[in-house]
């Protein structure tokens, strides 16, 4: 497996702990599975590929859709390279149907596997843009890094 190396800027305050629930948790499961796609076939069900021809940035793509917990997930694959270029998932919220779009680009070889170094996530009220500079495969990580962080100290 490959994990991105991220160094948090020292001049910014740490990001607070936010629990994932509902559609956010489902979306995180899909995002994680797409970074290590060996199990995506089992994660999504009800596959279909009967979509009209589509292009992204002028390049023809194949479109397939699966479902996870009643959430449709569309995957767009470059017809020439076979690489995933976009993911679109839908979820219900008290405000109605929300759409999250994730675009993958700048694929580079990492230990013989093409990995996206640029990932842009767009949702109804925001956008995240991640540009990786390095990915190292099979790096040992202390399991304590995955524990729930301590609550922040109260303000003085």
Image (cartoon, rainbow, N blue to C red):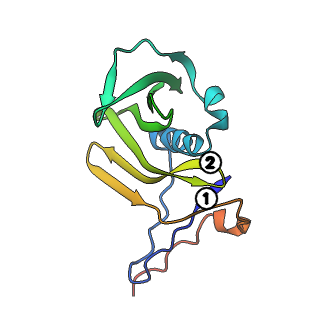
Question: In the image shown, does 57 or 149 lie closer to the viewer?
Answer: 57
The image position of residue 26, as x and y in percent, is 52, 38
Q: Residue 50: which quarter of the image?
A: top left
In which quadrant is the C terminus drawn? bottom left
Q: Residue 110: which quarter of the image?
A: bottom right
Residue at x 41% of width, y 77% of height: 13
Residue at x 47% of width, y 22% of height: 64
The answer to whether 85 is drawn above or below residue 53 in the figure is below
Question: In the image shown, does 118 or 34 lie closer to the viewer?
Answer: 118
Residue at x 50% of width, y 37% of height: 83
**Residue 70 appears in the figure:** no
The image position of residue 107, as x and y in percent, is 48, 49
**10 Å neighbourhood of mark 1: few (<14), some, or many (≥20)?**
some
Question: In the image shown, does 125 or 58 lie closer to the viewer?
Answer: 58
Q: Secondary structure at mark 1?
A: strand
**Residue 14 appears in the figure:** yes
Residue 46 - label: none
The answer to whether 80 is drawn above or below residue 35 in the figure is above
Residue 113 - label: 2
Q: Secondary structure at mark 2?
A: strand
- Measured in 3D between alpha carbons, the distance from the residue under mark 2 to the one under mark 1, in whole angstroms, is 13 Å
The image position of residue 48, as x and y in percent, is 49, 15
Residue positioned most to the front: 80
The answer to whether 91 is drawn above or below residue 156 in the figure is above
The image position of residue 125, as x and y in percent, is 26, 48
**10 Å neighbourhood of mark 2: few (<14), some, or many (≥20)?**
few
Question: In the image shown, does 114 or 74 lie closer to the viewer?
Answer: 114
Residue at x 55% of width, y 40% of height: 34
Residue 3 - label: 1
The answer to whether 18 appears left or right of 4 in the picture is left
Tag 1 or tag 2, which sits nearer the N-term?
Answer: 1
Q: Are the residues flagged by discs 2 and 1 in contact, CB closer than 8 Å?
A: no
């Amino acid at each position: 497996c490959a994990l991105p190396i991220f160094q948090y800027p020292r001049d910014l305050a740490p990001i607070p702990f936010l629990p994932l629930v509902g559609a956010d948790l489902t979306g995180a499961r899909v995002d994680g599975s797409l970074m290590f796609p060996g199990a995506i076939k089992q994660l999504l069900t009800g596959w279909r590929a009967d979509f009209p021809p589509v292009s992204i940035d002028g390049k023809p793509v194949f479109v397939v859709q699966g479902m996870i917990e009643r959430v449709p997930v569309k995957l767009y694959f470059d017809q020439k390279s076979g690489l995933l270029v976009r993911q679109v998932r839908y979820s219900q919220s008290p405000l109605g149907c929300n759409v999250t779009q994730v675009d993958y680009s700048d694929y580079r070889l990492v230990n013989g596997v093409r990995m996206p170094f640029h990932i842009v996530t767009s949702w109804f009220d925001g956008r995240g843009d991640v540009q990786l500079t390095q990915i190292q495969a099979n790096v040992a990580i202390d399991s304590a890094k995955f524990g729930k962080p301590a609550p922040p100290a109260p303000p003085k």
